[in-house]
Amino acid sequence: MSRAPGPGSAVDVAVIGGGQAGLAAGYFLRRTGADFVILDDRERPGGSWSDYWDSLRLFSPAAHSPLPGWWMPDQDGEEFPTADHVARYLTAYEQRYALPVRRPVRVTGVRRTAGALEVAGDAGTWRARSVISATGTWRAPVVPHLPGRAEFTGRQLHTASYRRPEEFAGQRVVVVGGGNSAAQILAEVSEVAETTWVTRRPPRFMPDDVDGRALFDIATRRERDRRAGGPGTGAVAALGDIVMVPSVREVRERGVLKAEPMFARLTRDGVAWSDGSAQPCDAVVWCTGFRPVLDHLAPLGLPDADGRVATEGTRSVAEPRLHLLGYGDWTGGASATLIGAGRTAKTAVAEITASLREGADGAD
Protein backbone atom coordinates (compact mmCIF):
# COMPACT_ATOMS: atom_id res chain seq x y z
CA MET A 1 0.00 0.00 0.00
CA SER A 2 1.48 3.34 -1.02
CA ARG A 3 1.71 6.11 1.51
CA ALA A 4 -1.38 8.33 1.35
CA PRO A 5 -0.80 12.10 1.56
CA GLY A 6 -1.50 13.25 5.09
CA PRO A 7 -3.46 16.22 6.46
CA GLY A 8 -2.11 19.55 5.30
CA SER A 9 -1.06 18.12 1.93
CA ALA A 10 -1.78 19.66 -1.44
CA VAL A 11 -2.83 17.06 -4.02
CA ASP A 12 -4.02 17.02 -7.59
CA VAL A 13 -7.17 15.07 -6.71
CA ALA A 14 -8.95 14.20 -3.48
CA VAL A 15 -11.41 11.29 -3.71
CA ILE A 16 -14.04 11.24 -0.98
CA GLY A 17 -15.18 7.66 -0.38
CA GLY A 18 -13.28 4.38 -0.58
CA GLY A 19 -16.02 2.07 -1.85
CA GLN A 20 -16.33 0.69 -5.35
CA ALA A 21 -16.63 4.06 -7.13
CA GLY A 22 -13.75 5.61 -5.20
CA LEU A 23 -11.49 2.62 -5.86
CA ALA A 24 -12.34 2.64 -9.57
CA ALA A 25 -11.38 6.32 -9.68
CA GLY A 26 -8.17 5.49 -7.84
CA TYR A 27 -7.28 2.83 -10.41
CA PHE A 28 -7.43 5.31 -13.28
CA LEU A 29 -5.79 8.12 -11.30
CA ARG A 30 -2.87 5.79 -10.50
CA ARG A 31 -2.37 5.21 -14.22
CA THR A 32 -2.18 8.97 -14.93
CA GLY A 33 0.58 9.60 -12.40
CA ALA A 34 -1.52 12.21 -10.59
CA ASP A 35 -0.88 12.91 -6.92
CA PHE A 36 -4.07 11.90 -5.14
CA VAL A 37 -5.57 10.67 -1.90
CA ILE A 38 -8.71 8.62 -1.15
CA LEU A 39 -10.43 9.62 2.08
CA ASP A 40 -12.68 6.93 3.52
CA ASP A 41 -14.77 7.20 6.68
CA ARG A 42 -14.80 3.48 7.40
CA GLU A 43 -12.56 1.58 9.76
CA ARG A 44 -11.74 -1.07 7.14
CA PRO A 45 -11.91 -1.62 3.37
CA GLY A 46 -14.90 -3.07 1.54
CA GLY A 47 -17.23 -0.10 1.32
CA SER A 48 -20.87 -0.57 2.25
CA TRP A 49 -20.76 -4.22 1.15
CA SER A 50 -19.67 -5.08 4.68
CA ASP A 51 -22.97 -3.70 6.01
CA TYR A 52 -25.45 -5.56 3.80
CA TRP A 53 -27.70 -8.32 5.01
CA ASP A 54 -26.22 -11.80 5.20
CA SER A 55 -27.98 -13.39 2.22
CA LEU A 56 -27.65 -10.54 -0.29
CA ARG A 57 -26.44 -11.66 -3.72
CA LEU A 58 -25.26 -9.76 -6.76
CA PHE A 59 -27.59 -9.79 -9.76
CA SER A 60 -24.71 -10.90 -11.99
CA PRO A 61 -22.03 -13.59 -11.90
CA ALA A 62 -18.56 -12.55 -10.73
CA ALA A 63 -17.26 -12.50 -14.30
CA HIS A 64 -19.73 -9.70 -15.12
CA SER A 65 -19.05 -7.64 -11.99
CA PRO A 66 -15.43 -6.45 -12.11
CA LEU A 67 -13.80 -3.17 -11.25
CA PRO A 68 -11.31 -1.98 -13.88
CA GLY A 69 -8.11 -3.97 -14.29
CA TRP A 70 -8.93 -7.08 -12.30
CA TRP A 71 -11.77 -9.57 -12.71
CA MET A 72 -13.65 -10.52 -9.58
CA PRO A 73 -12.73 -14.12 -8.67
CA ASP A 74 -15.54 -16.68 -8.71
CA GLN A 75 -17.01 -17.69 -5.37
CA ASP A 76 -17.02 -21.41 -4.74
CA GLY A 77 -20.52 -22.86 -4.92
CA GLU A 78 -22.17 -19.54 -5.80
CA GLU A 79 -23.24 -18.38 -9.25
CA PHE A 80 -24.12 -14.95 -7.88
CA PRO A 81 -21.53 -13.75 -5.31
CA THR A 82 -22.49 -12.79 -1.78
CA ALA A 83 -21.97 -9.32 -0.30
CA ASP A 84 -19.18 -10.68 1.88
CA HIS A 85 -17.37 -11.99 -1.21
CA VAL A 86 -17.63 -8.56 -2.83
CA ALA A 87 -16.26 -6.88 0.31
CA ARG A 88 -13.25 -9.21 0.26
CA TYR A 89 -12.73 -8.46 -3.44
CA LEU A 90 -12.74 -4.70 -2.81
CA THR A 91 -10.26 -5.16 0.04
CA ALA A 92 -7.91 -7.16 -2.16
CA TYR A 93 -8.38 -4.69 -5.03
CA GLU A 94 -7.29 -1.77 -2.86
CA GLN A 95 -4.17 -3.68 -1.87
CA ARG A 96 -3.43 -4.98 -5.36
CA TYR A 97 -3.18 -1.48 -6.82
CA ALA A 98 -1.59 0.11 -3.74
CA LEU A 99 -4.22 2.80 -3.64
CA PRO A 100 -3.44 5.70 -1.25
CA VAL A 101 -6.38 5.41 1.13
CA ARG A 102 -6.53 7.16 4.49
CA ARG A 103 -9.09 5.90 6.97
CA PRO A 104 -11.04 6.52 9.00
CA VAL A 105 -11.46 10.10 7.82
CA ARG A 106 -14.92 11.66 7.89
CA VAL A 107 -15.03 14.57 5.46
CA THR A 108 -17.10 17.37 6.96
CA GLY A 109 -16.98 19.95 4.20
CA VAL A 110 -15.60 20.95 0.80
CA ARG A 111 -14.99 24.66 0.32
CA ARG A 112 -13.63 26.92 -2.37
CA THR A 113 -10.29 28.49 -1.63
CA ALA A 114 -7.71 30.33 -3.69
CA GLY A 115 -6.92 28.15 -6.70
CA ALA A 116 -8.16 24.95 -5.10
CA LEU A 117 -10.86 23.14 -3.18
CA GLU A 118 -10.33 22.63 0.52
CA VAL A 119 -11.41 19.23 1.80
CA ALA A 120 -11.88 19.38 5.56
CA GLY A 121 -12.34 16.32 7.75
CA ASP A 122 -12.11 15.18 11.33
CA ALA A 123 -8.47 14.19 10.72
CA GLY A 124 -7.36 17.44 9.08
CA THR A 125 -7.54 19.33 5.79
CA TRP A 126 -6.34 18.65 2.24
CA ARG A 127 -6.06 21.11 -0.66
CA ALA A 128 -7.02 19.64 -4.02
CA ARG A 129 -7.12 20.98 -7.57
CA SER A 130 -10.02 18.60 -8.25
CA VAL A 131 -12.36 16.57 -6.04
CA ILE A 132 -14.26 13.37 -6.73
CA SER A 133 -17.23 12.71 -4.45
CA ALA A 134 -17.94 8.97 -4.26
CA THR A 135 -19.75 8.58 -0.95
CA GLY A 136 -22.69 6.55 -2.22
CA THR A 137 -26.11 6.39 -0.58
CA TRP A 138 -26.03 3.64 2.05
CA ARG A 139 -25.71 5.97 5.02
CA ALA A 140 -28.75 8.06 4.10
CA PRO A 141 -31.76 5.71 4.36
CA VAL A 142 -35.18 7.14 3.53
CA VAL A 143 -38.29 6.37 5.60
CA PRO A 144 -41.55 8.04 4.51
CA HIS A 145 -43.27 10.43 6.89
CA LEU A 146 -46.55 8.72 7.75
CA PRO A 147 -48.97 9.43 10.57
CA GLY A 148 -48.56 7.18 13.59
CA ARG A 149 -44.91 6.25 13.19
CA ALA A 150 -44.12 7.55 16.67
CA GLU A 151 -47.15 5.73 18.16
CA PHE A 152 -46.31 2.27 16.81
CA THR A 153 -45.01 0.12 19.68
CA GLY A 154 -43.52 -2.61 17.52
CA ARG A 155 -40.13 -2.65 15.88
CA GLN A 156 -39.27 -0.46 12.88
CA LEU A 157 -36.10 -0.86 10.86
CA HIS A 158 -34.79 0.09 7.44
CA THR A 159 -33.06 -2.11 4.89
CA ALA A 160 -29.78 -0.60 6.13
CA SER A 161 -30.30 -2.22 9.55
CA TYR A 162 -31.67 -5.59 8.41
CA ARG A 163 -29.34 -8.58 8.78
CA ARG A 164 -31.11 -11.95 8.86
CA PRO A 165 -34.67 -13.40 9.07
CA GLU A 166 -34.26 -15.40 12.28
CA GLU A 167 -34.77 -12.29 14.40
CA PHE A 168 -38.42 -12.21 13.19
CA ALA A 169 -39.24 -15.86 13.78
CA GLY A 170 -42.91 -16.34 14.71
CA GLN A 171 -43.76 -12.64 14.30
CA ARG A 172 -46.11 -10.68 12.03
CA VAL A 173 -43.99 -8.54 9.72
CA VAL A 174 -44.96 -5.86 7.19
CA VAL A 175 -42.38 -5.31 4.44
CA VAL A 176 -42.72 -1.94 2.68
CA GLY A 177 -41.25 -1.22 -0.76
CA GLY A 178 -41.52 -2.20 -4.42
CA GLY A 179 -37.87 -2.84 -5.29
CA ASN A 180 -35.30 -5.59 -5.16
CA SER A 181 -34.45 -5.19 -1.49
CA ALA A 182 -38.09 -5.57 -0.45
CA ALA A 183 -38.62 -8.65 -2.61
CA GLN A 184 -35.47 -10.38 -1.38
CA ILE A 185 -36.10 -9.59 2.28
CA LEU A 186 -39.73 -10.66 1.95
CA ALA A 187 -38.58 -13.94 0.42
CA GLU A 188 -36.53 -15.00 3.40
CA VAL A 189 -38.55 -13.44 6.22
CA SER A 190 -41.67 -15.19 4.92
CA GLU A 191 -40.00 -18.53 5.68
CA VAL A 192 -40.02 -17.83 9.43
CA ALA A 193 -42.76 -15.24 9.94
CA GLU A 194 -46.24 -14.19 8.82
CA THR A 195 -45.57 -11.49 6.23
CA THR A 196 -47.51 -8.78 4.43
CA TRP A 197 -45.93 -7.00 1.47
CA VAL A 198 -47.01 -3.38 0.90
CA THR A 199 -46.14 -1.20 -2.12
CA ARG A 200 -47.14 2.26 -3.36
CA ARG A 201 -47.87 0.88 -6.81
CA PRO A 202 -48.25 -2.66 -8.16
CA PRO A 203 -44.78 -4.28 -8.25
CA ARG A 204 -43.19 -4.75 -11.65
CA PHE A 205 -41.25 -7.96 -12.13
CA MET A 206 -38.59 -8.43 -14.77
CA PRO A 207 -38.61 -11.53 -17.00
CA ASP A 208 -37.04 -14.55 -15.35
CA ASP A 209 -34.15 -14.61 -17.82
CA VAL A 210 -33.04 -11.01 -17.13
CA ASP A 211 -30.21 -10.47 -14.66
CA GLY A 212 -27.50 -7.87 -14.16
CA ARG A 213 -25.76 -8.80 -17.39
CA ALA A 214 -28.74 -7.84 -19.51
CA LEU A 215 -29.50 -4.77 -17.42
CA PHE A 216 -26.03 -3.35 -17.84
CA ASP A 217 -25.99 -4.04 -21.57
CA ILE A 218 -29.30 -2.20 -21.94
CA ALA A 219 -28.12 0.71 -19.80
CA THR A 220 -24.94 0.96 -21.87
CA ARG A 221 -26.88 1.12 -25.13
CA ARG A 222 -29.18 3.77 -23.68
CA GLU A 223 -26.26 5.93 -22.57
CA ARG A 224 -24.49 5.53 -25.92
CA ASP A 225 -27.67 6.55 -27.71
CA ARG A 226 -28.08 9.57 -25.46
CA ARG A 227 -24.51 10.74 -26.06
CA ALA A 228 -24.99 10.37 -29.80
CA GLY A 229 -27.90 12.78 -29.62
CA GLY A 230 -30.65 10.18 -29.55
CA PRO A 231 -33.54 10.15 -27.09
CA GLY A 232 -31.91 7.67 -24.72
CA THR A 233 -34.55 5.00 -24.33
CA GLY A 234 -35.91 3.98 -20.95
CA ALA A 235 -35.43 0.31 -21.77
CA VAL A 236 -34.22 -0.75 -18.32
CA ALA A 237 -37.12 0.90 -16.52
CA ALA A 238 -39.54 -0.59 -19.02
CA LEU A 239 -38.44 -4.10 -18.09
CA GLY A 240 -39.55 -3.72 -14.48
CA ASP A 241 -38.15 -2.96 -11.03
CA ILE A 242 -37.48 -6.39 -9.51
CA VAL A 243 -34.90 -8.85 -10.77
CA MET A 244 -36.14 -12.43 -10.42
CA VAL A 245 -33.17 -13.89 -8.58
CA PRO A 246 -33.60 -17.50 -7.38
CA SER A 247 -34.92 -16.57 -3.91
CA VAL A 248 -37.61 -14.30 -5.41
CA ARG A 249 -38.66 -16.93 -7.95
CA GLU A 250 -38.97 -19.44 -5.11
CA VAL A 251 -41.18 -17.19 -3.00
CA ARG A 252 -43.35 -16.61 -6.06
CA GLU A 253 -43.87 -20.36 -6.28
CA ARG A 254 -44.98 -20.36 -2.63
CA GLY A 255 -47.63 -17.76 -3.46
CA VAL A 256 -46.22 -15.13 -1.14
CA LEU A 257 -45.17 -12.61 -3.78
CA LYS A 258 -48.44 -10.66 -3.62
CA ALA A 259 -48.50 -6.99 -2.69
CA GLU A 260 -51.12 -4.97 -0.85
CA PRO A 261 -51.60 -1.23 -1.48
CA MET A 262 -49.75 1.18 0.75
CA PHE A 263 -51.31 1.78 4.16
CA ALA A 264 -52.25 5.30 5.23
CA ARG A 265 -50.89 5.29 8.78
CA LEU A 266 -49.42 3.26 11.59
CA THR A 267 -51.38 2.53 14.75
CA ARG A 268 -50.17 1.55 18.18
CA ASP A 269 -50.14 -2.14 17.26
CA GLY A 270 -50.08 -2.24 13.45
CA VAL A 271 -50.98 -0.49 10.21
CA ALA A 272 -54.24 0.91 8.84
CA TRP A 273 -55.53 1.72 5.37
CA SER A 274 -57.63 4.67 4.26
CA ASP A 275 -60.69 2.43 3.79
CA GLY A 276 -60.74 1.74 7.53
CA SER A 277 -59.21 -1.73 7.42
CA ALA A 278 -56.32 -2.45 9.76
CA GLN A 279 -53.80 -5.19 10.48
CA PRO A 280 -51.77 -5.83 13.60
CA CYS A 281 -48.05 -6.48 13.25
CA ASP A 282 -44.94 -6.82 15.36
CA ALA A 283 -42.47 -5.21 12.99
CA VAL A 284 -42.27 -2.99 9.90
CA VAL A 285 -39.27 -3.27 7.56
CA TRP A 286 -38.89 -0.12 5.47
CA CYS A 287 -37.29 -1.05 2.13
CA THR A 288 -37.83 2.47 0.89
CA GLY A 289 -34.50 3.49 -0.59
CA PHE A 290 -31.71 5.94 0.08
CA ARG A 291 -30.58 9.48 -0.69
CA PRO A 292 -27.13 10.50 -1.91
CA VAL A 293 -24.73 11.21 0.95
CA LEU A 294 -23.73 14.74 -0.06
CA ASP A 295 -23.81 16.74 3.16
CA HIS A 296 -20.06 17.39 2.78
CA LEU A 297 -20.86 19.46 -0.33
CA ALA A 298 -23.21 21.81 1.51
CA PRO A 299 -20.54 24.57 1.87
CA LEU A 300 -20.42 24.73 -1.94
CA GLY A 301 -24.18 25.33 -2.09
CA LEU A 302 -24.67 22.57 -4.67
CA PRO A 303 -27.16 19.94 -3.46
CA ASP A 304 -30.78 20.72 -4.35
CA ALA A 305 -33.90 19.95 -2.32
CA ASP A 306 -33.75 16.32 -3.45
CA GLY A 307 -30.13 16.00 -2.37
CA ARG A 308 -28.74 15.93 -5.90
CA VAL A 309 -26.19 18.07 -7.72
CA ALA A 310 -26.73 19.32 -11.27
CA THR A 311 -24.20 17.56 -13.48
CA GLU A 312 -23.04 17.24 -17.07
CA GLY A 313 -21.96 13.62 -17.12
CA THR A 314 -20.13 13.34 -13.80
CA ARG A 315 -18.97 16.97 -13.60
CA SER A 316 -20.79 19.50 -11.45
CA VAL A 317 -22.30 22.25 -13.55
CA ALA A 318 -21.75 24.95 -10.92
CA GLU A 319 -18.32 23.75 -9.72
CA PRO A 320 -16.35 22.19 -12.61
CA ARG A 321 -13.53 21.08 -10.29
CA LEU A 322 -15.96 18.61 -8.71
CA HIS A 323 -17.02 15.25 -10.14
CA LEU A 324 -19.59 12.84 -8.66
CA LEU A 325 -19.36 9.08 -9.08
CA GLY A 326 -21.60 6.16 -8.25
CA TYR A 327 -24.84 7.78 -7.12
CA GLY A 328 -27.12 6.39 -9.84
CA ASP A 329 -27.98 7.05 -13.46
CA TRP A 330 -27.76 10.82 -12.97
CA THR A 331 -23.98 10.38 -12.56
CA GLY A 332 -23.65 7.94 -15.48
CA GLY A 333 -25.54 4.90 -16.75
CA ALA A 334 -25.43 2.05 -14.20
CA SER A 335 -22.85 4.02 -12.18
CA ALA A 336 -24.06 2.52 -8.91
CA THR A 337 -23.05 -0.98 -10.07
CA LEU A 338 -19.56 -2.46 -9.86
CA ILE A 339 -18.90 -2.59 -13.58
CA GLY A 340 -20.70 0.69 -14.21
CA ALA A 341 -18.60 2.46 -11.56
CA GLY A 342 -15.48 1.60 -13.53
CA ARG A 343 -16.80 2.95 -16.80
CA THR A 344 -17.96 6.26 -15.38
CA ALA A 345 -14.73 6.62 -13.36
CA LYS A 346 -12.68 6.24 -16.53
CA THR A 347 -14.52 9.10 -18.21
CA ALA A 348 -14.35 11.32 -15.12
CA VAL A 349 -10.61 10.80 -14.63
CA ALA A 350 -9.95 11.53 -18.31
CA GLU A 351 -11.79 14.86 -17.94
CA ILE A 352 -9.96 15.67 -14.73
CA THR A 353 -6.58 14.84 -16.26
CA ALA A 354 -7.28 17.12 -19.21
CA SER A 355 -8.37 19.91 -16.86
CA LEU A 356 -5.26 19.54 -14.70
CA ARG A 357 -3.08 19.63 -17.78
CA GLU A 358 -4.77 22.76 -19.06
CA GLY A 359 -4.30 24.40 -15.69
CA ALA A 360 -0.62 23.50 -15.63
CA ASP A 361 -0.11 24.82 -19.19
CA GLY A 362 -1.85 28.05 -18.28
CA ALA A 363 0.46 28.53 -15.33
CA ASP A 364 3.61 28.38 -17.49
Image (cartoon, rainbow, N blue to C red):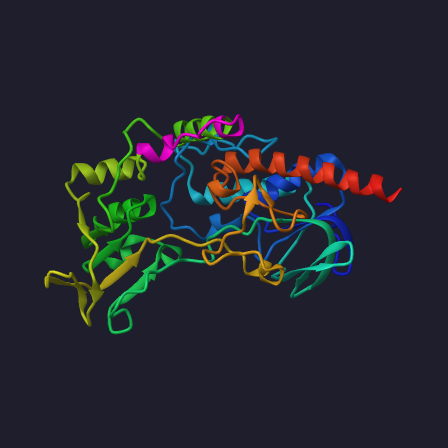
Residue 102 image point, x, y percent: 67, 54
Q: Residue at x 50, y 38 (%)?
A: 338
Residue ID at (19%, 43%): 257
Q: Which residues are magenta?
A: 225-239
Compared with residue 113, is residue 324 higher up or lower down, i.e. above or below?
Answer: above
**Where is residue 183, by image quadrant?**
top left
Residue 24 in which image quadrant = top right
Instruction: Using residue 61 as the reference point, say whether residue 238 is left or right of it.
Output: left
Left or right: 150, with 346 as reference point: left
- Left/right placement of residue 150 relative to residue 275 reads right
Query: Residue 345 or 98: which is nearer the viewer?
Result: 345
- Towards the viewer: 22 or 72: 22
- Whether residue 144 is in magenta: the answer is no
For residue 65, side relative to residue 252 (left or right)? right
Residue found at x 24% / y 47%: 201
Q: Position of residue 208 (x, y in %)?
A: 27, 29
* Picture residue at 18% right of the left edge, 52% below the top: 261
Q: In the rendered view, tell whether residue 121 sits above or below residue 19.
A: below
**Which percent across, then down, holds residue 118?**
71, 59
Given residues 84 and 123, the one toward you in this image is 123
